[in-house]
Image (spheres, rainbow, N blue to C red):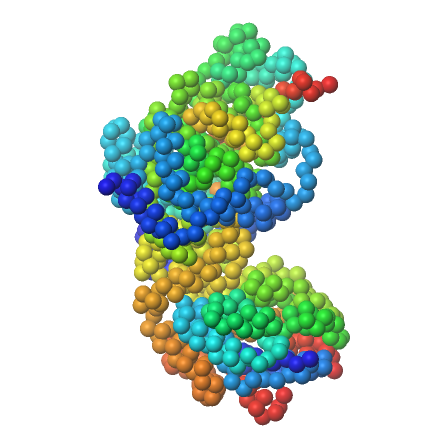
Amino acid sequence: MKVSLFATCLANQFYADACADTVRLLRHLGVEVDVPKAQTCCGQPAYNAGRRAEACDMARHTATVFSDSGYIVLPSGSCVGMMRSHYPDLLSEDETVPDLVGRTFELSQFLVRVMGVTKLGKGLEGQQIAYHHSCHALRELGVRDEPLALLRGCGAEVVPWEADEECCGFGGLFSAKLPETSAAMADRKLDTLPEVDVLTSTDGGCLMQMSGRASRRSVGPPFKHLASLLWEGVGT
Amino acid sequence: MSARDRILGRVREALAERKQEAHPGPFGGWRSEGEDTPAVDRFIQLFEAAGGEVVRFDDDAVAAAWVRDFVSKYDAVSMGRLARWPTAVGAESPELVLKSADPADSDVGVSLAYGAVAETGSLIMTPQDGRRAQLLPPVHVVWVEEKMIFPMLYQALSTLGKDLPSAVGLHSGPSKSADIGQILVKGVHGPGRLIAVLLADKKNST
Amino acid sequence: MSGGSTPGQYRNEAARTIREEPQVRDSVTKATLTFDAHRVEAFAQIDSERWRDWARDVKTHLLTHLDKYLEEAEAQLIANGAKVHWAETAEDALEILAGIVREHGIKSAVKAKSMLSEELRVNPHLEKLGVDVRETDLGEYILQLLGEPPSHIVGPAIHKSLEDCRELFHERLGTPVNAEPDELAAAAREALRKDFLAADLGISGGNFMAADTGTIALIENEGNIRLSTSLPRVHVAFVGIEKLVPTLTDVAGFVQLTSRAATGQPVGNYVSLIQGPKKADEPDGPEEVHVVLVDNGRTKLLADDEAWEALRCVRCGACLNICPVYRQTGGHAYGWTYSGPIGAIIAPGILGLEESMPLPHASSLCGACADVCPVRIPIPDLLVHWREKAVTAGLAPKSETLGLKAYSALAQRPKLFNTAGAIMRRAPLELGGRALPILSGWVLERAAPEPSAKSFMQMWEEGIV
């Protein structure tokens, strides 16, 4: 099986190890991974800001970069959500796009739904984990059970958390434009968080938001990207 | 051109290029599971869950005696016009005539409902009875014929719709509010006690 | 405008509320979580997806035939003995009201809770006309005593705690300092009873209006709407033109769906179905019923090829209850009558695009609202739609325009993109805040993120992975 990795602009710079762990995890499962060099950004920041022209340009670039790929896997729910929900409309003149986005998956989604894998190893045994459902993974992709199955499959306990499906307040540029409201949303997450060994999510933006706020307030558990935690879960 | 014409004109202009969509058909109150409970039981279940009280009678005279006894404990009674049916309570109770007062000064009001709705646990109140008697006294006693309990609200409205009075009220329990710190309180403006006196459907009762 | 604020003040008002009034965030969070939990329970009892599809389709049909239904409703209302007025703007609506007040020598009015009457600013106008106006919904009554506008579509005073109410009632109504909620409610009931009995005029809105029977449907729990529309000799109902539904049997579906979505009840405790003034065989009821059909920007929304879907709104408040942004501040920070997700998507039609900014941006686009909307309004798509319109209208901040244009140009040139990334990594956000002003807001509330030792693309290039 061959997969092209789309690191995504944010993870590429701030969660590079998670991208690397994604590659390691896929290779461990016998998947051949390539990384098209011309990849940059899916265009979501422009799209969400109402800059349709710029979003189209970035979408077109991304679609071209991955046009020859089979499966495309991303360590991010929001970027996959962007591609699946909006590329067919932004690039309506390109008939290959619906098929392309149909082959595009967030990592946990790919492991469970395409590869049928839920048991990676025992590397997370004894760990109590809080799982944050990133909005786009949850609502745009319907990814809810996959990460939980994978984490439990590695022996972890995913602890109940009343605010686990609530938005963390990242929202891309929203976090910088309306920082006070954004921080209050992160506080809601942090203040309802039970005692855990680690907090994880499919999305680096969410982790950056919550860990940044936690750090400012000197609270909170360690934060790890799901890809890195699952690689740890392999336990080799 | 009047405001009316200008508004309608803007509406037509806005819709000029828009695809017209068909009405999807009547509302069906669709449930996730089958609903086999008889209408009267369903009505009682919802009405009581909302804080309403229910008493049931097979016999009109017994029901009338119960109401007479109930209201006799209060100083001032307000009878809706139609609540004089089935006559046993009204004209033949001189003590109630003496107690009769304007709804604004009454402790208890007695009305006849047009019917009820099982699906929502609602009494259907029509204005011929007098709206003030249905709203002002702190306690409200309502006659309801069980044969006029509609399973679904749309059925009730469909029937009512053929000859509508000035206003119909659906009363589904005692007056309530949670506006004070999200805590439920009763009897804020409407009656704080709502009692449904159900009169059995003689055709179907054993 | 709400409490003297405007949408343009959103950021400051939100920041101030969060910083200086933490009890508002607590009260609003508690209330909205409760409402939403009730909605979930109520939706689980029905085939909620089917109900939502039906409601969306009825409202879509209604809106695409709106002129026909408006004409039908008007004819029916007139046949019922009601008087029908048409108001293009808020000023026109107030002028119509003033005419009725003068004609009848109105001195006192009781008001049912009506968001439209807030939008039109009915109360200040009535006061100018010398009419003593009393809000009768308990939540609105509390706010009227405080001089505050509503902060939520269904529960206007959810930003107030029990303590706030105790203090207020002790001061104004003489209740004991530690009065229980039912003592407070009893005091309000007694105070308002006199107003109901004395009022010349009752004012309401309209949740729905059936075109086939000329029926105004009003949903409530307290009984103040039944009283306000039954006791005074004149009743004036303000109804937005989008509130129509084709038939009275359609109303059956909508009152149930709206009640379940708003508070989780199978139906609101009282539903008033009003056709017109009292008939000859009725002992009481208003002698005159006036219906004011209000446009006030709704035709503008209707003309927008995407935003017209927002007119399906049934004002249930479910989107406010689920919104993680709304939850942090309540409605006042939005600076307008309608707040939360629905407020942001109708404001550009009713207030104008520039006046509405930045409300379409006061969202992380989490999508929770679209999941709960009983009439399936695609709220996140409409938020992006208005953001696009704002860009086209030149309303986007300059730094954002320049920043995103530059970013997009780089993103189409991979080598430059990676070089720029390398530069950004060496100048962490505290410094980058000057180079990238749109990101400077980050460090106000959070620690700057640490870039990875090497970018992934660099690691890949170097064969580390």
Rendered location of residue B9, percent (x, y): 30, 45
Q: Residue at x 68, y 43 (%)?
A: B33
Quadrant of the rendered image containing residue A8: bottom right
Q: Residue at x 72, y 70 (%)?
A: A116
Q: Is residue B189 left or right of residue B31?
A: left
Residue in the foreground of this view, choosing between C304 and B184: C304
Rendered location of residue B6, percent (x, y): 28, 44
Residue in the foreground of this view, choosing between C400 and A180: C400
Is A188 located above or below residue B183 in the figure?
below
Q: Residue at x 47, y 60 (%)?
A: C380
Residue in the foreground of this view, choosing between C435 and C287: C287
The C terminus of chain C lies in which quarter of the figure? bottom right
Rendered location of residue C192, percent (x, y): 40, 32
Q: Is residue C263 visible?
A: no
Q: Is residue C149 visible?
A: yes
Residue extending furthest toward the bottom: C462
Is C130 located above or below residue A42 in the figure?
above
Rendered location of residue B194, percent (x, y): 56, 27
Q: Residue at x 54, y 49 (%)?
A: C53
Is A185 located above or below residue C441 in the figure?
above
Q: Is residue C197 left or right of residue B173?
A: left
